[in-house]
Image (cartoon, rainbow, N blue to C red):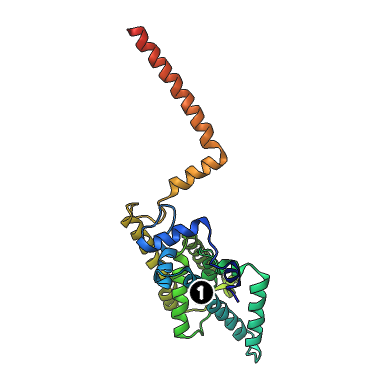
Amino acid sequence: MLLWVAVFNGYPVFFPDSGQYLWASFDLQPPIYRTIGYSIFIRLVSFGTSPWLVVIAQSVIAIFILHSAFDFIVRQNGPSERGGLVFLGLMVFLVFGTTLPWFVGQIMPDVFTGLFLLSLFLLLYDSKISLERTVLLSAVFCISIGTHITHLLTVTLLLVAILVLRTLGAFREFWPTQSIKGIVACVLVPIMAITALLALSNWRSGFGFTLFPAKPVFLFGRLIESGLAADYLEALCARLLRVWRATLHLRRGTR
């Protein structure tokens, strides 16, 4: 059901950015203003054959994360004999009442924004989760934060906020229930691994050992969008033209 948009479209939904992600999945050379994480995901799940395998994998991951979150909520409120039907009804609502199928059915990393938040929540607060599901959640979390640089920044800020709340007794209900070892193994280690992977991929591409080498590109784009770049270039060109004319006049006078 999650793929109904892609099926209706006749092909996975593409945006102008989708082609660059696909291209990078073949040569693993990230553009200066994109991370390599989503392209690696495409390479792993599609085997270089068809984008359909990418959206199918995204739908499977989305259902797995949603079911894990639903199972956690059900366990917090007691067992339910109709849990399967309730989850099916919830999925029907999400499929036809939200934009989830659009994000799942497109070749873009946007779907992983919600998935990394839910997987982080489960890894921190579901202390009764099985080992197998913990490993899968950690893998999804690792993939999700690597698909976009903003995910890495967001998870860092969230963990800092949780640590601050951890020092305040009034916010005891916000303290993670997972053990310290579990948080280190399933949350911190994936973050450090993805951070190293992104930095190494940029270094390999000649951008330096950095997470985000495109700061000047985005800054210049912002200046163009606001009109400041055009005003500055016009003023600069006018000043250079006056200097050039003055220099030419002096040369003629010297002759």
Q: In this rendering, is residue 89 above or below 252?
A: below
Q: Nearer the viewer, residue 93 or 210?
A: 93
Badge 1 is on which residue?
A: 56
Residue 176: x %, y % from top left: 52, 75
Under circle 1, the secondary element is helix
Q: Nearer the viewer, residue 223 or 128?
A: 223
Residue 37: x %, y % from top left: 42, 64
What is the total number of numbered labels drawn onto the structure image? 1
Q: Nearer the viewer, residue 85 or 178?
A: 85
Residue 57: x %, y % from top left: 49, 74
Residue 30: x %, y % from top left: 39, 57
Horizontal side of 5 relative to 221 (left or right) equals: right
- What's under tag 1, amino acid-wise? Ile
Horizontal side of 239 relative to 93 (left or right) equals: left
Q: Is residue 176 visible?
A: no
Q: In this rendering, is residue 34 above or below 221?
A: below
Horizontal side of 184 relative to 129 (left or right) equals: left
Horizontal side of 41 relative to 66 (left or right) equals: left
